Image (spheres, rainbow, N blue to C red):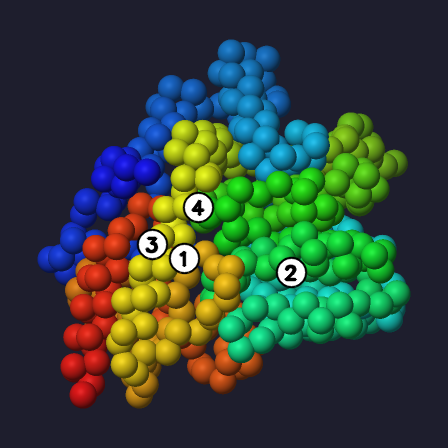
Amino acid sequence: MNVAAVRSDFPILSREVSGKPLVYLDNGATTQKPRAVIDKISRFFEHENSNIHRGVHYLSMDATDQYDRARERLAKMINAPKTCEVLFVRGTTEAINLVTNSYGERLQEGDEILLTMMEHHANIVPWQILAKRKGLVIQVAGINENGELDLDDFSAKLNERTKVAAFTHVSNALGTINPVKEMTRLAKEKGAMVLVDGAQAVPHLRVDVQDIGCDFYAFSSHKMFGPDGVGVLWGRQQWLNAMPPYQGGGDMIEQVSFAGTTFRGIPERFEAGTPNISGAIGLGAAVDYLNEIGHEKIELYEKGLLDYATAVMSEISGLNIHGRAADKVGVISFTLDGIHPHDIGTILDTEGVAIRAGHHCAQPLMDHLKVSGTARASFAFYNTCEEADTLVAAIRKVQKMFA
Ligand SMILES: Cc1ncc(COP(=O)(O)O)c(C=O)c1O
């Protein structure tokens, strides 16, 4: 992969912060956008803007067509059996809330939901709200000292009362890639529905929902080089057809009268109101961009980058890496002895290095690790080994300041 060429596709990467070249290592929070996505969105607003599904005029039909084609690209990207199974939502958070609110209706008191210790709050809190409303029981599968899922514990916590297993494909705080195919198989053996949170997987890995075998797969555009405010919930047609609407309003109905309303089929019944049209089209452009580079190339390059960054960071004494899974994406969560993660983040920023510091919306995981938070450097395919060196030099500066 020609990283210099790739970097030139991302205008923001050539700017400076604090008088230093920007080293953007906060990709777990959000990724930067390539020119192709930026141009697609501005072209839409400059020349093509219209609402979808309503107009009989050229612009509306064109916008509808582009929106539908974006859905097709996403279906192809995750190997969804049917395009209509791809729902546009606001992001991973809304995707999971859609499932808990709609699919969740069928759950009954005493039913169990199995989560893991490494979930983002987006895959904990919606289930807790549902559990409180319905009298459900939440079980949590543990992790080992490397930050890998304890598959035996996961398996042991599955039983005939388990109606849902919901887990992340990739941990945002540790970088761990979970064995989602095996986890899905185990959960399905017990008859549980499986939801996979793919927010941190889609920017790094080729995802195949049919191969995983799950029932729902959720992800956000902004974490995969697309615009924010849009994301995807993929769900099996058989479930989506059987689920009640999540929100009511325009575009999702067949017939409305004060006597009652009938709803459209999928995907429209789950896309009430005017959706994020430009966002979906921009996301479609991000899919095209990723396809052009190629997922295999991205995975290979990022693996080398992670190995390099891990090696150079491991040489820093007093630096502890949290999460040393054998199967990882380019996320390095770390603490420095005696230095608060926020101080690390603030000082790195003066060197132009952007990282995230805090609990990463994974407070139960932080409690388990017995830390209040960590500093997290999260890499994308446009980052380089030189940037990892800059990070290391900046961390050494932090240590000197606190020595
Ligand atoms: C693993 C994981 N799940 C869910 C989310 C929530 O995504 P969003 O805020 O885009 O809805 C995130 C965001 O950081 C995440 O990392």
Q: Nearer the viewer, mark 2 or mark 3?
A: 3
Q: Residues within 10 Å of mark 2 (few under 14, many from 20)?
A: many
Give above or below for 140 relative to 217.
Answer: below
Q: Residue at x 79, y 67 (%)?
A: 158
The image position of residue 319, as x and y in percent, is 32, 78
**On residue 299, which mark appears?**
4
Three-letter amino acid code of the residue under disc 2: Phe
Q: Given contact means CB atoms under 8 Å apart, are the residues at marks 3 and 1 in contact?
A: yes
Find the distance from the CA under tag 1 to the CA under tag 2: 19 Å
Find the distance from the CA under tag 1 to the CA under tag 4: 10 Å
Res 25 → quadrant: bottom left
Find the distance from the CA under tag 3 to the CA under tag 1: 7 Å
Q: Nearer the viewer, mark 1 or mark 4?
A: 4
Find the distance from the CA under tag 2 to the CA under tag 4: 22 Å
Is the CB–ligand 1 distance for label 3 below 8 Å?
A: no
Q: Residue at x 49, y 84 (%)?
A: 370
| Label whose residue precedes the other's in the sequence (1 or 4) | 4
Q: Nearer the viewer, mark 1 or mark 2?
A: 1
Three-letter amino acid code of the residue under disc 1: Gly
Three-letter amino acid code of the residue under disc 4: Glu
Find the distance from the CA under tag 3 to the CA under tag 4: 10 Å
**Which residue is disc 2 drawn over?**
167
| Label whose residue precedes the other's in the sequence (2 or 4) | 2
Residue 272 seen anywhere in this rendered image of the structure: no
Residue 204 seen anywhere in this rendered image of the structure: yes
| Label whose residue precedes the other's in the sequence (3 or 4) | 4
For label 2, the SS is: strand
Three-letter amino acid code of the residue under disc 3: Leu
| Label whose residue precedes the other's in the sequence (2 or 3) | 2
Find the distance from the CA under tag 2 to the CA under tag 3: 26 Å
